[in-house]
Every structure is written in structure tokens, then in C-alpha cells.
Image (tube, grey):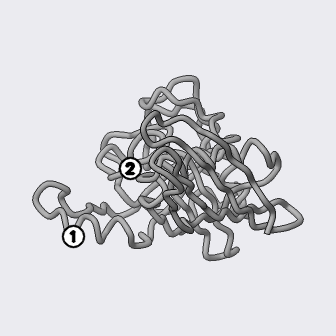
Amino acid sequence: MYHHQQNTQYPFGGYPYQPQAYYPPNRGHFPHLFHMWRQQPIRGQATWTEGGPVTQCGIPWSENSYMTVAVGGNAPYECGEAIKVRYPTTGRELIVTVVDRVPGYPANQINLHRQAFEALGANLDAGVINVEIIPSPNLEEEKWGKYLLEVTKIAYPGYNVVDYSFVNKTELSPTKVREVYDFVLQSPTEKIKIRGRVTYNPNTDRVLSFNLEEA
């Protein structure tokens, strides 16, 4: 079993196998390739940790109800970014938040908090599992989508957000814009779909109203 308490080092010793290094296209030299790569599922491996009191992102492991992850120092994910992790063995997916960065860690290797690892249906004794890492640039580029994501997680305790999609954006007036997103939530007993709507003033960035509705 792979298990540790410190989150500043992630030694390869103790893994059932050592993952191969994986490097994404250079963002500056090949912007188009980088953008295409960002939207593709990446096959990699995930281990688990109990986390620790300090992270390079300054974000606690308890963020997002412990659905959190550490990534490589050269991985193209930002601190606080949401990424999707899929475990093909069980078919389960999770949206996790990046809370730590580890220099020298391969870009296709991640370290999930124990609770996220278990939420995927993985056995802790496995230590390391094969996963698909799916970057989520669409939501990250839409701050109001991320706003609704946070509201949804608070409104539905005990559920994990496993998927989301942008629906539409409507300019109702020069001072009123509405954006709509769909979220898929999973609990131990059911999967539900939530439609979130937020209306805001684009000039002041103030929220005028929002609502969540089960589909």
C-alpha cells in the first residue's frame, strides 16, 4: 500500500511501478498544440495521500470536501483549477481541485486525497491506479460557471460533482447577462442533474440572482 503524510515530497519508491515521464507541448512555442492537448483526456496514474498542513498552492487539502489533488510542477494545471479524473475500472469520475504542486512529478501523474481516491471506487491497498485526467478549461475560463459550481457543492452536501457543461449565455440588457450551466452530481446511492443559472451585471460583476434546479 502506498501511503504518506507529507505533501511536499512524493517519492516513487513503493509504487508498484514507476510512471513514465510525460511532457505536454510547450505553451509558448506551440500554443495551438497546447490548446488541443488541454482538451484531450490524458492517460496516467493516481496515488493517494492523507495530505498535510502546508501546500505550495496555499490551499488546504480539505478544500472541495477533500476532493483535492496534487500535480506535477510542470503540469499545465493552475492552483485552484478544477480537473476531472476518471477511473476506467469502475467508470466513476470526479471533479477535483488542484491544491499542491510537486517539482519533478510527471505531468500525467497525480496524487489524490484519500477521500477522492476512495470516491472513485479504488481500493486503498492498490496504492496506484490507472486513470484518465481530463482538463476542464471551459469552466475555468468562465468564472460564473465556477461560481455556480461552488454554490452547487455547498447546496448538495454528500454529493460529488462528476461532470458539467456550459449551456448558454444571454444578454438580457446592457446591465444584465444570464449564464446557464448543467452539473451532474453523484452520491453513494444516486446520480442527479442540476441546472444552474446566474444573472449578473457585466459592468460591476455583481450577482443579481441565481438559482439551482434539479432536472
Q: Which residue in the rendered view is the most extreme toward the top?
A: 53
Instruction: Give the residue at x 46% y 33%.
Output: 204
**Residue 173, image x and y in percent?**
50, 52
Relative to the observer, which residue lies in front, 170 or 128? 170
Q: Residue at x 14, y 54 (%)?
A: 28
Horizontal side of 188 relative to 167 (left or right) equals right
What is the quadrant of residue 161 in the picture? bottom right
Percent coordinates x, y for residue 149 in the rendering? 63, 50
Q: Quadrant of the C terminus?
A: bottom right
Q: In the image, is 1 to the left or to the right of 44? A: right
Gap between marks 2 and 1 measured at Cα? 16 Å
Q: Which mark is residue 33?
A: 1
Which one is nearer the viewer's eye here, 176 or 143?
176
| Residue 35 left/right relative to 2 | left
Q: Amino acid at mark 2?
A: Tyr
Check residue 42 in the rendering and tell me which mark sits there, or answer none: none
Element type at mark 2: loop
Q: Which mark is residue 77?
A: 2
Single out the residue that lies furthest toward the left.
Answer: 29
Query: In the image, what residue occupies the spot 62% across and 40% down?
Result: 208
Q: Is residue 155 toward the left or the right of residue 5 in the image? A: right
Please say if 116 is above or below 40. Answer: above
